[in-house]
C-alpha cells in the first residue's frame, strides 16, 4: 500500500481531426504534474511476482493549440480525477523487482474546440466534459530499501477512447452545418512512488 504516490508527467499530446469533410489533423502537447495513492496485493513464488494494484488521484495536466492552417481554430484539453486497476507481473532479484503492468483506466477529460477564436460565438463552440475509459500499460523498477518500505520509478501509458463533439454551426444546419471534432487523448507518464508492505499469509519478499 502506498501512503503517497507522487507522479510527474513530462509531455504528451492530444490528437484530433475536425471538419470531417476536410480530414485535417491537429495535435497539441499537454504537460503537468499529478499525484495520488495506490494499494495492492502481491504474490511471490521464488523469483516470480504477480499482483493487482488499484490507484487513483488527480491529473493536473492540460494543453492547448491552434490549427496550423486555420489560425482561428483553437483547441484545448484538460484532465482531472483518474483511477486505474492493473495487474502486475515481474521478476525479483534480491530486494529489487522488475515488473510490467496492464489494465484499465478512467479519467475525467475536458476537450474544447473553438471555431472562431478569440470570438465567443456559441454557434462555433464545441465541448466534451466527461469521464472516459481507456487502456493502461507500462512497467518499472521497485526496490525495498528499509524494512517494509519500497521505492519505485515507473512508466505508464494511458490511452483513452476517442470522443466527438459538435459546434452548432449556424443553428439551422443549412448555411453552416455543425462541425464535428474528433479528439484522441493519450498520456505518457513517468511516476515516482513510495509503498509500505503489510505482512500476511502470502507476501512478496523482494
Image: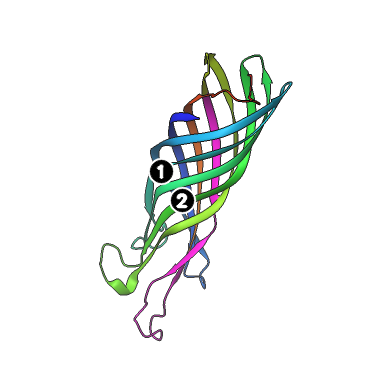
- Identify the disc placed on residue 184: none
Q: Specify the quadrant that holds the C terminus.
A: top right
Badge 1 element: strand
* Residue 160 belongs to magenta span: yes
Looking at the rendered structure, the number of numbered marks drawn on it comes to 2
Measured along the vertical axis of the image, is residue 53 above or below residue 177?
Answer: above
Q: Residue 101: horizontal and vertical position, in percent? A: 62, 37
- Identify the disc placed on residue 59: 1
Badge 2 element: strand
Determine contact: label 2, label 1, CB under 8 Å: yes
Q: Residue 183: horizontal and vertical position, in percent? A: 48, 59
Q: Pick the residue in front: 143 or 118.
A: 143
Q: Is residue 45 left or right of residue 110?
A: right
Q: Pick the residue in front: 173 or 87.
A: 87
Q: Pick the residue in front: 130 or 23.
A: 130
Neighbour tally class for label 2: few under 14, some 14-19, many 20 plus, Cα within 10 Å: many
Image quadrant in which you'd find residue 57: top left
Q: Residue 82: horizontal and vertical position, in percent? A: 45, 47
Measured along the vertical axis of the image, is residue 175 above or below residue 86?
Answer: below
* Marked residue nearer the N-terminal end (2 or 1): 1
Which residues are the magenta region? 152-181
Measured along the vertical axis of the image, is residue 174 above or below residue 190?
Answer: below
Neighbour tally class for label 1: few under 14, some 14-19, many 20 plus, Cα within 10 Å: many
Q: Residue at x 64, y 25 (%)?
A: 201
Measured along the vertical axis of the image, is residue 127 above or below residue 151?
Answer: below
Q: CA distance from mark 2 to mark 1?
A: 8 Å
Q: Is residue 3 left or right of residue 171?
A: right
Q: Pick the residue in front: 43 or 144.
A: 43
Q: Residue at x 38, y 47 (%)?
A: 62
Residue assigned mark 2: 107
* Residue 159 belongs to magenta span: yes
Q: Residue at x 38, y 80 (%)?
A: 176
Amino acid at each position: 500500500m502506498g501512503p503517497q504516490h507522487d507522479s510527474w508527467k513530462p509531455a504528451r499530446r492530444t490528437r484530433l481531426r475536425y471538419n470531417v469533410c476536410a480530414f485535417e489533423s491537429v495535435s497539441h502537447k499537454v504537460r503537468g504534474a499529478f499525484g495520488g495513492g495506490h494499494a495492492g496485493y502481491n504474490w511471490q513464488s521464488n523469483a516470480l511476482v504477480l499482483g493487482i494494484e488499484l490507484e487513483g488521484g488527480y491529473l493536473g495536466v492540460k494543453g492547448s493549440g491552434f490549427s496550423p492552417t486555420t489560425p482561428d481554430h483553437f483547441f484545448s484539453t484538460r484532465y482531472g480525477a483518474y483511477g486505474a486497476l492493473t495487474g502486475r507481473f515481474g521478476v525479483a532479484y534480491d530486494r529489487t523487482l522488475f515488473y510490467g503492468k496492464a489494465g484499465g483506466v478512467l479519467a475525467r477529460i475536458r476537450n474544447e474546440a473553438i471555431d472562431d477564436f478569440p470570438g465567443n460565438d456559441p454557434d462555433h463552440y464545441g465541448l466534451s466534459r466527461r469521464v472516459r475509459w481507456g487502456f493502461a500499460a507500462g512497467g518499472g523498477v521497485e526496490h525495498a530499501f528499509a524494512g517494509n518500505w519500497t521505492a519505485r520509478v515507473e512508466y505508464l501509458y494511458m490511452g483513452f477512447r476517442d470522443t466527438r463533439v459538435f459546434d452548432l454551426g449556424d443553428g439551422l444546419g443549412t448555411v453552416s452545418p455543425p462541425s464535428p471534432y474528433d479528439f484522441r487523448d493519450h498520456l505518457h507518464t513517468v511516476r515516482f512512488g513510495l509503498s509500505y508492505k503489510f505482512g500476511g499469509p502470502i507476501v512478496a519478499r523482494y
